[in-house]
Image (cartoon, rainbow, N blue to C red):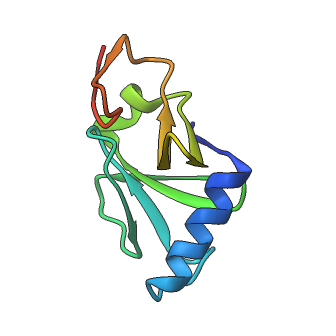
């Protein structure tokens, strides 16, 4: 479903640890607006996926839009942060936080 690069995995574990979450027990939540947050609760409308040792919760409405997405992390000079490489997006905004199909 969603792939997690090694750099994204390392950064997610670092940030979860800093925020008091337990890596490999708590989740990353992603939504249609490329919202990413750490969470440790799942609702009935969520689907859980795991890649590279990271559990990801996606609400069931968003699954079709995010299929094949790769979550990466960039720490370079051109900006740092998590990046959603979504093959379904025809257009994205300049900051990469939203997309259209």
Judging depth in this view, the residue of 29 and 72 nearest the camera is 72
Kindly indicate the quadrant of the structure image that contains residue 25: bottom right
On screen, residue 51 versus residue 41, left or right, reads: right
**Percent position of residue 20, x then y:** 46, 89
Left or right of 52 on screen, residue 4: left
Q: Residue at x 35, y 54 (%)?
A: 46
Give the vertical position of 2 relative to 24 (above or below): above
39 versus 64 height, above or below: below
Total labels: the figure holds 0
Q: Examine the rendering and report whether any part of residue 21 can be seen.
A: no
- Give x and y (percent) for residue 88: 44, 17
x 27%, y 24%: residue:
93
Of the 4 image quadrants, the one containing the C terminus is: top left
Taking the image as drawn, is residue 67 in sight? yes
Tell me the quarter of the image containing the N terminus.
top right
Residue at 63% x, 74% y is 24
Q: Toward which corner of the image does residue 40 lie, by quadrant?
A: bottom left
Observer-nearest residue: 74 or 34? 74
Q: Residue 27: where, in percent of width, then height?
A: 48, 67
> How far across and down, in percent of the image, does residue 23 sit?
60, 77
80 or 38, which lies in front? 80
Write the residue at 39% across / 27% down: 64
* Residue sticking out furthest to the front: 77
Q: Is residue 77 left or right of residue 5?
A: left
As drawn, 44 above or below 5: below
């Amino acid at each position: 479903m969603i792939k997690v690069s090694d750099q994204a995995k390392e950064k997610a574990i670092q940030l979860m640890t800093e925020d008091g979450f337990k890596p490999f027990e708590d989740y990353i939540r992603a939504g249609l607006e490329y919202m990413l947050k750490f969470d440790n609760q799942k609702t009935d409308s969520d689907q859980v996926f795991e890649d590279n040792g990271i559990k990801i919760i996606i609400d069931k409405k968003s699954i079709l839009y995010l299929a094949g997405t790769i979550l990466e992390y960039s720490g370079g000079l051109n900006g740092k942060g998590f990046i959603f490489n979504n093959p379904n997006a025809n257009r994205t905004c300049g900051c990469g936080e939203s997309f259209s199909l």
